[in-house]
Amino acid sequence: MNQNIEGQTSSLKKSEVKNLEKFLRKKISKSKIITWDIAKLLTKTSQELQRSIGITIMRNGTVESVTVGGPKDILPNSKTRLRNIASRLSGYRFVYCSFEHSFNQRILNDLETKRHDLICKISMDSQGIPSNVDLAHLVPDQSGRDKIHIINLESLLDIDFSFYEFIEQLENDFESLYMPQFLIEDQVKALLCYHGMDHTVSDEDIRETHELARTAGLKIIDTFFQKRGPIHHRTLFGSGKIQELIDRAIFKGADIILFHNNLSPNQFRILGDLIELPLIDRTQLILDIFAQHAKTHEGKLQVELAQLQYTYPRLREKNTQMSRLVGGIGGRGPGETKLEIHRRRAKEKINKLSKSIEKIRDIRKSQRKMRQRNDTPQVSIVGYTNAGKSTLLNAMTQSDALSENKLFATLDPLSKRLRFPKDQEIILTDTVGFIRDLPKELIEAFKATLEEIETADLILHTIDISNPHFEAHIEVVDQILAELSLDHIPQLKVFNKSDLIDELEAQNISKQFEGYAISALHRSSFQNLISVIQDRLDF
């Protein structure tokens, strides 16, 4: 088989291959997109084979390759040059005959990603004679994202411009618009996709993943989902849906694909081989946020361990998927080189980090014993992420711990002394926030941090009362505390952000759950809370 004949060639006869090789000896004038004779040969061959047939033509008029497709499906050959310069096109045009009435989305995606000079689709009548012609080419746009311009003509004879002059002017237009400016994307563009079998994925779940993406620096530009049918055990979606996903990602200009569903190691490896774009799942997204927010040596060690433990079974033989991560999303932080290393070295690193964190746990254990000997009560603030725990710590102790309107803004635990009016002191500790389906790798790696809660005399369970799903958040936190065997510690529910809802409604909710409504932004709302804490600690 001639290497310049590509596509669906396995069923072709030798005589059919020889007919296709005729195209490789043709030459087209630089001023023409395609000649009538070659167009007629293209439609005739296409009708005989009942296939879409296309030719890739260089600017000097040489036919570089022939592509064989299906009746309605064809893509230019893979050798087409990719140019990263925004003002230049690839130097190739693709002319094909198809039984389709219009351009399909896949070929328009290919036009955009490979920056072809032009794509020409020739239709034919019942006798195999060229009829309608459709042209598609890129045009520059002020937004920095090229647009696709489509021209519909009734005949090849209606093409009334010189192709060479047309391309020269088009590249001048690109250069005049793009060269004076630097087009910089502030955020990595992500396509969010998920499978919601039996409606197990709620709108709140997706909203939360959107918020996680925002915190990580991802911009969700589109959502791709399937709500019916079983989850494919190897690829989450079926093969047809996977191709649709790839086409959507290319069309939307996504830099990365974010899976709301957590992927198994096998799914991750298979999808990584099928999809050319980088991909991450929800757990990797959470790990990435932790990597961004880890400031202390201890926090960095714990994040690195969690990342390694999660990615270790997902390392692929080629390891190209993991090295293609965009903007560091899903792989940044102190352990980012883990994505390049051999399995054996990764395992050695995991063992080393585990030993280091074990030493930290021993140190913390000694520190807790010293605090217990001082007989100073310990109070831990726990709660769902972004419930306002750090803001509450700052307000109660008049400190300046980092507090942002982002998920997991606080990672490293922070302890401050709080003096009560009766000249009594407590140690108030802010801990890492919880979230639904908190990765088990994080729980394991952060045991040294979460053990701070073990010696607490009281837990302040902080709840964002303004969140319409606060009851579900309460259940998540209680479940995680139970899994950590910390549910025996006395708990006081603190309904924060009460200033964002009706005052009477806040009071009714807090009474229903035997808690106290406050606003961490207004210290005047703490009076009842402080009194209850004193009573609970028997001051």
Image (cartoon, rainbow, N blue to C red):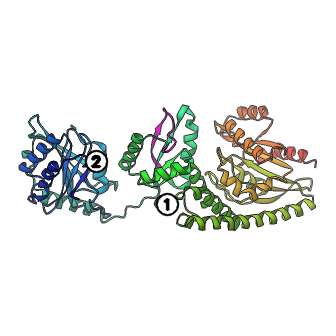
Report the front residue among 309 and 189: 309
**Lower position in the chain sequence, tag 2 or tag 1:** 2
Q: Is 359 left, or right, of 74 in this rendering?
A: right
What residue sits right under mark 2 in the picture? Answer: 108
Report the front residue among 89 and 484: 484
Look at the image and say whether residue 345 sits in the magenta stretch.
Answer: no
Q: Position of residue 469 (x, y in %)?
A: 64, 37
Tag 2: amino acid:
Leu
Residue 399 is marked as: none
The answer to whether residue 146 is seen in the rendering is no
Q: Label 2, secondary structure: give it.
A: helix
Task: Calculate the distance from the C-alpha at mark 2 to the C-alpha at mark 1.
Answer: 33 Å
Report the front residue among 44 and 451: 44
Task: Name the residue: 55% across, 48% down.
Answer: 263
Q: Is 392 left, or right, of 26 in this rendering?
A: right
The magenta stretch spans which residues?
219-235
Task: Name the residue: 49% across, 60% down.
Answer: 317
Check the picture and name the quadrant holding the N terminus: bottom left
Q: Position of residue 65 (x, y in %)?
A: 20, 57
100, above or below 140, in the image:
above
Tag 1: amino acid:
Glu
Task: Name the residue: 47% across, 39% down.
Answer: 225
Residue 317 is marked as: 1
